Amino acid sequence: MAFDFPQSTKGSHNLVENPAIVEFNPKPNSKEISVTNFVRNINPQSEKGEIFKGKSKLNSKKGIKGSGSGLNQSSVPGDVVIGNGRSITDLPPVLISEIFNCLDPKDLGIVSCVSSILLSLASEHHAWKEFYCERWGLPAAFVAPESGIGDAGLDEKSWKEIFVEREFRSKIFMGRYSMDVLRGHTEAVRTVFLLASAKLIFTSGYDTVVRMWNMEDGLSIASSKPLGCTIRAVAADTRLLVAGGTDGFIHCWRAVEGMPHLFELRSSQHNQNTEVRLWGHDGPVTSLALDLTRIYSGSWDTTVRVWDRHSMKCTMVLRHSDWVWGLVPHDTTVASVSGSDVYVWDTNSGNLVIIVPYAHVGNAYALARSRTGDFIFTGGEDGSIHMYEIVHDSYATEASHVATWDPHSGPVYSLAFEFPWLVSASSDGKLALIDVRQLLRTSKRALGKRATKAKHSGEVNVEPPQRMLHGFQNNLYSVDIGAERIICGGEEGVVRIWNFTEALEIERRVRALRGMRLEQRMRRRKLQTELSSKGGRSDQCSVAAKKNSVACVWPSKRGMSGKTKA
């Protein structure tokens, strides 16, 4: 791998002139850089540099490690130093950036603590944006800034600050929560959808009405007119809302410019500019999804249909062997569950890429997918949850089984995923929260390109669900997660919201107090350093105190006689 060394960099000339200093490991697919004579020990007595013999390795995961006998922790100075007294920060920025590309977020954060120069380089590195987008996608303020939705303060933050804050927020689902109950549906709720970027919740079910709620206060904003049949699927973004009915249609609402809540669900008269109904399926529509250019719909007629959002025409039909229960698109592929099997299709050619037969005992009802599309989660009639990794190589694409959980005593009807949490809803009336962070490997190019365990090593040690949420006594049909909330609907006919923002505020206060204590410790340490720097003066004072010590006379019990004590 070759790098261009800038001519203006003084340190780079020294590196080029002495090729023995840095040599790249000739091993294929290696991310280590072997460094000879890398650390110089400055002896204050001889005032000469002593070059350690042997080699050191700059590893992308473990930092710098030495194999020479003379390289030890006590001999390494504050900054890592190259021969002739040059610091590692004298390397060209392009080379340092390539080294940083090999680090994950944790290691990149550790590197930023080494020195102020590395702090500046690591904090401004483009990898933080990649880390964020691979986990959660672009923030709402960057996706649709013209809509006014999102946090205007994001423009003033670096991508490292945005990533650290979002990573902090992802840990609150183990904390304290409050529960809100939304009432308005007259029958069972079959589907819920959280549009976190607009702070809206959409629900529907057996009462044939689509309802829109305010995410923050839980108040009902609007409801549609009865659509004539059960609504089993709802999906939305900031431009389009779609609902699928058991009569085989897809009802669409386009966003209205100037509307504070995007969609006009109940208009006085049918407006073809804002409402469209699509026909094509011969059975109930069970699942819906959107991307920037397409609408995806799955049905009990054993097909997945792909629709063009601009023309509202069906452009592709993907045929399965059984009823389609769920689907999740990603880029140029769409994953689906039909019967007990799992499918992955290429939406450009319409070809079947992967099929996992008999993934569950009985029907596979639920499907979720990671943001990068590399991992698929399925839930089924047998109560199990499976995790698969889509592995690409030069010959074929296959699905490798990673893990299995059995947290429920009944069928799993719905799954939702937001890094790192997988949430499942079951007929046993419980929600299971599973942290899959340990099953994903963080790399510079894609989050979780490989499982942390060996792909084909048989059994995988999997932790049980980190948390179980209760509150329903009947079937739970649909669940969604986002914006520090979990939304769920079921046979009870109400929508429940588990709100974890209270835990977020508590954690923020704890972090603020921890920062204050750290600042106080640093102040005390600085004060102690200043006092120790004046040690000579304090020693003189102590010597003078000993010389001028006064003899003390202790009175005796027998009168004036006493005992002298120095």
Image: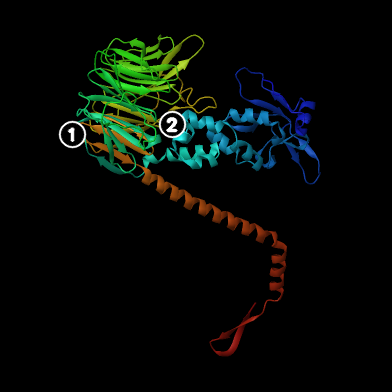
Q: Observer-nearest residue: 107 or 493? A: 493
In the rendered structure, the answer to whether residue 158 lies left or right of residue 337 reads: right
- In this picture, is 243 found above or below 161? above
Above or below, comparing residue 520 to residue 174 in the picture: below
On the image, the x and y values in percent for residue 559 come to 56, 91
Q: Where does the image place residue 230, in percent across and percent down from the top left?
A: 21, 24
Q: Residue at x 22, y 36 (%)?
A: 494
What amino acid is labelled 2 in the image?
A: Arg
**Which element is circle 2 on?**
helix
- Pick the quarter of the image with the N terminus: top right
| Amino acid at pointer 1 | Thr
Q: Is residue 413 above or below residue 346?
A: below
Circle 1 SS class: loop
Residue 124, horizontal then vertical, whole percent: 60, 36
Q: Quadrant of residue 7?
A: top right
What is the residue that sits farthest to the bottom in this orientation? 559
As drawn, the label of residue 186 is: 1
Instruction: Answer left or right for 35 relative to 140.
Output: right
Q: Is residue 324 visible?
A: yes
Q: CA distance from mark 2 to mark 1?
A: 39 Å
Q: Is residue 386 visible?
A: no
Between marks 2 and 1 in the image, the one whose residue lies nearer the viewer: 1
From the viewer's side, name the closer residue of 234 and 266. 266
Q: Which mark is residue 437?
A: 2
Residue appearing at x 69%, y 73% in the figure: 545
Which quadrant, please, contains the C terminus?
bottom right
